[in-house]
Image (tube, helix red, strand yellow):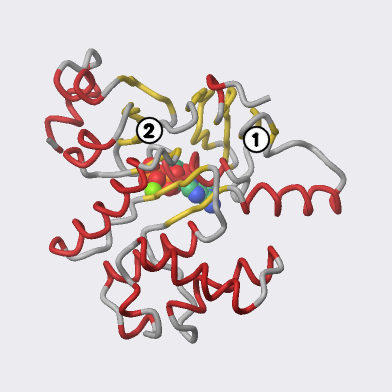
């Protein structure tokens, strides 16, 4: 079932809040190992689309598929809960605001979900936490609490925590927007490393240079539609739509 064409397959996604239609028939396919950036003005529906992928923000209409399985399939409540928990374990998500547990060390933040959800022993989960924190360059701070870490370090712990579940897909929603400028690069470097390891990623970002350097494709969203998409060298250099040109004029 793992057709290379449609590892992630968003089919005719539509989402309304009352009369406000925030996603208007969006379709998007991402191949395994591909990295897609989503750019666009505030309020264009980027976060809504990302949250719809793991059904945190259920679509009004449309289907989300990951690796041959429909994420948002209709099931009786109990079955749905089991299904969506399994799906969410396969989808790592990193938000703008590091949602680390403040009363837990970096190690425990990373080890918790594998212990609780995958039944790893404390030793196994601690070893996994060490591996993942090492990968994001945070091994030296493994016993620090979030309050003892900088924003960039917290965000790297948040990435390690998502990676500890061995997700098939990573979603980043403006992971560096809340950081002081000098801390952005250390987080971007971690994302670049994941890209080199062929992680499939969908990245909402305001950083055009970063998108251009790591992404295979860039989607420009505005008012709930994908206005234009293409490889970064095409979309950034030769956008065909006026709305894309106007947006890039302000952000490049
Ligand atoms: P972006 O991430 O591109 O800035 P969002 O996906 O956050 O955009 O929001 C898209 C639109 O949906 C905005 O107009 C926003 O006000 C609206 N919206 C988002 N969440 C809700 C909600 N829970 N209830 C009502 N409207 C919402
Ligand atoms: Mg957003």
Residue drawn 34% across the image and 55% down it: 175
Q: Nearer the viewer, residue 28 or 248?
A: 28
Q: Earlier in the sequence, mark 2 or mark 1?
A: 2
> Can you give x and y, in whole percent of width and height, for residue 240 in the image?
23, 13
What residue appears at the point 69 percent right and 65 percent down from the top-left corner? 117
Label 1: how many Cα within 10 Å (few below 14, some 14–19, many 20+) = some
Residue 128: percent from the left, percent from the top? 52, 67
Q: Is residue 67 above or below residue 96?
A: above
Q: Is residue 152 above or below residue 205?
A: below
Q: Residue at x 38, y 37 (%)?
A: 44
Instruction: Indicate left or right for 188 with 165 as reference.
Output: left
Taking depth in this image into account, of 222 and 164 the one nearest to the observer is 164
Taking the image as shown, residue 192 lies to the left or right of residue 68, namely left
The secondary element bearing badge 2 is classed as strand
- Foreground disc of the pair 2, 1: 2
Q: Which mark is residue 60?
A: 1
| Image quadrant in which you'd find residue 37 | top left
Residue picked out by circle 2? 36
Q: Is residue 186 above or below residue 112?
A: above
Vertical arrangement, residue 82 with respect to residue 110, above or below: above
């Amino acid at each position: 079932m793992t057709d290379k064409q449609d590892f992630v397959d968003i089919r005719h996604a539509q989402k309304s809040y009352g009369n406000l239609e925030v996603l208007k028939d969006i379709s998007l396919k991402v191949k395994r190992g591909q990295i897609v950036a989503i750019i666009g003005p505030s309020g264009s529906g980027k976060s809504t689309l990302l949250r719809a992928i793991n059904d945190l923000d259920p679509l009004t209409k449309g289907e989300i598929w990951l690796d041959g399985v429909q994420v948002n399939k209709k099931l009786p409540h109990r079955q749905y809960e089991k299904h969506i928990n399994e799906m969410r374990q396969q989808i790592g998500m990193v938000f703008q605001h590091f949602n680390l547990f403040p009363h837990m060390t970096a190690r425990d933040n990373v080890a918790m979900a594998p212990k609780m959800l995958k039944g790893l022993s404390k030793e196994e989960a601690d070893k996994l936490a060490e591996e993942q924190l090492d990968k994001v360059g945070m091994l030296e701070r493994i016993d620090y609490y979030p309050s003892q870490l900088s924003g960039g370090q917290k965000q790297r712990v948040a990435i390690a925590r998502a990676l500890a579940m061995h997700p098939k897909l990573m979603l980043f929603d403006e992971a560096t927007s809340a950081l002081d400028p000098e801390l952005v690069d250390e987080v971007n470097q971690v994302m670049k490393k994941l890209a080199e390891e062929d992680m499939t990623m969908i990245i909402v970002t305001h950083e055009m240079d970063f998108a251009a350097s790591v992404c295979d494709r860039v989607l420009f969203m505005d008012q709930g539609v994908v206005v234009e998409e293409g490889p970064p060298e095409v979309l950034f250099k030769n956008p065909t739509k006026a709305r894309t040109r106007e947006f890039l004029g302000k952000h490049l």
